Image (cartoon, grey):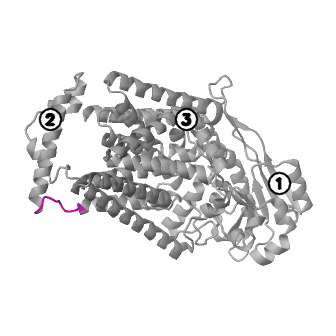
Amino acid sequence: MRRERLWILCSILLFLALGFFLFASGGTDDTHITYWVSHALARHGQLLNFNGERIEQSSSLGLVCLLALLHRITTIPIPILGHFTGLAFGAAAIAWAVWLARAVSPRLAYLAAPLVATTGGFLYWSTSGMESSFAAFAAVLALLQCARFQDSMGADAPASGAADKKTAGREPAETGDEAADEGSIDEGAAEKRASNEVKAGEAAAAEQRPGGERPVDRGLLIRAGLAMLLFVTVRPESPVVLLCVLVAAVAGHGIEALRLRTSDARRRLLGALLLLGCGAAAVALLLAFRQAYFGSFLPNPAVAKSGGFALSEGLKYLWRGIWANNVAMLLSLVLVLVLLGRDLVRGRVAPALLFTAAFCFAYLGFIATSGGDWMPGARFLSQAIPALAALTIMVIDRMIRRPMLAITAVALFAGLNLFGTLRYAREDLGFPGTSALEFAARVRSGIPEPGFTTAELLNRSHLRDAPLIATLLDLMRQLGPTSEDPVYLMSGQAGMIPYYVFLEHGSAARLIDLYSLTSDRLLRCLPRNHLKQSVYGSAMSYEYFFKNQRRIRKDCRLPKPTIIFSTSLRPPLRRLLAENGYTVVYHQKGQIRDPDRGSFFQASARAEGFIAVLKERAEKLNVKKVPLPW
């Protein structure tokens, strides 16, 4: 145990160091979609979108509630809580991955920690402040609790501490971990000890109930049910993934019961059915709450993106993600299928292996069928990394019996992870924390209002938006909106920019979301085939809006917006805006990259943004210059 804790601690420190020095803060401005709902819940006690409606604009109900609770307790700004909560869940997922690996491979379980800590996608998204690391942690927690309950259903599971009584008084040096530390493992002695523990468990079981059958451990079942309830609240696809895992567990233990025809096998099947019932109850509870509160079974972003599902695009996304992180994952997954199939044929499969393998393949199946994701860094795949690491350890353990060779294989796998991580950082996503802190200091000194947090400004998308936000807030103050006469804004940017607008102006502002992520107004009033369906959402183009303005005003009750803002202003869009009565009052350009031109980090991000205002309103505005930190 001492060695395991040391590996976990070192891996977490490596994870934090790599995250800061390679990525600073990953992801996009979508964090603030969730942050706003947390703010509304903490302040008003309601789950509201930007426009004050009961629309579930965040994809992670669990993270919304957690951040709101932490903010109420600590009063720490939600963007700071979001950033450090992501890192904390990343660290927790590393530790829980080891404990999950222990259930499928006790000999090498501690090596799951460095496998998770060195995977580029997991690192990048754990620094983002989004729900990815929370989802990864919740998945591993649910898998582990389900496996523990299922283990308790077997006749060979120690009951009520019986094994502890039998082995009381033994020296710690007799355990497998300590023996491994001294360089060798006495496998014969280990098998004898395991046999004694099984017999002790059977004896205790026989004492607990006439006929030798133990009652169901309700405590473990309740813990598994709560872990599953947490898991289904973290991501929109989690309920479907969970039900697939539990159905696979019932099928696997059903095969086991048919082949073995023993009371032990029947109890395992009963355990799988009980878990399926608990999981179905958790899903039903979540869906019932969503329907009652929001009037929809799914979060609004999931509804908006559902039209973009495409298997071919999903398979491409999955391949790109595996290739960028570690192509050896493919070999690991194939070998998992082989070993799982062999165990099923033999009639006995470890519950932890069955649950974890079912989760990984169910999640990969979702990625493929959903068409993937538009965000960089294989966001969807990152949520399965801890479970994949546990399976990889199991494969290496069962395929390579010599300890040193097995450890070498794990080291090679971790090396490939690290290679992919460095490639991510150099070519695509890298932004060193030292440079990010320098940029953040420039913004905070040059743009004191509205009081951005350093945690936000470590992110390149937020750095890009900071000057535009300061300018937009100044324009809003000059326009003087009220709740009775609100200013309508239109954009495809529904993250940090509207967060700060609504934080200051509340119901005096209204957002027309061109991608329908934060509002369902366009989804309800326009034919779906008039919107472009993709993984970005259900998009309405500027051309369509201006061409169908009368219809949109009548059917959607949306007026012509006073302000339009976005990130890219190409000549065709500038002409379109001018033709429809808008003046571009603000336009920023530039690139955000590591200021050291000879740096290892070659990645850069465009820092373009614009604000256009109706001509009759723009003439009365005074646009102040805001310093650009780049």
Name the residue type under label 1: Val
Q: Residue at x 59, y 29 (%)?
A: 423
Is residue 261 in view from this perspective?
yes
On screen, 281 above or below 311? below
Q: How many marks?
A: 3
Is residue 441 in view from this perspective?
no
Name the residue type under label 3: Asn
- Of circles 2 and 3, the one toward us is 2
Residue indicated by mark 1: 585
Is residue 118 one of those drawn in magenta? no
On screen, 438 above or below 572? above
Q: CA distance from mark 1 to mark 2?
A: 80 Å
On screen, 592 above or below 264? above
* Numbered mark located on residue 15 in the image: none
Q: CA distance from mark 1 to mark 3?
A: 43 Å
Q: Quadrant of the N terminus?
A: top left
Q: Left or right: 504 with respect to 44?
A: right
SS at badge 3: helix
* Residue density around tag 3, few if under 14, some if 14–19, many if 20 or more, within 10 Å: many
Mark toward the start of the polypeptide (2 vs 3): 2
Residue indicated by mark 3: 325
Prevalent SS, magenta region = loop
Q: Left or right: 97 with respect to 159?
A: right
Point out the stretch of residues depicted in magenta.
210-217
Residue indicated by mark 2: 192
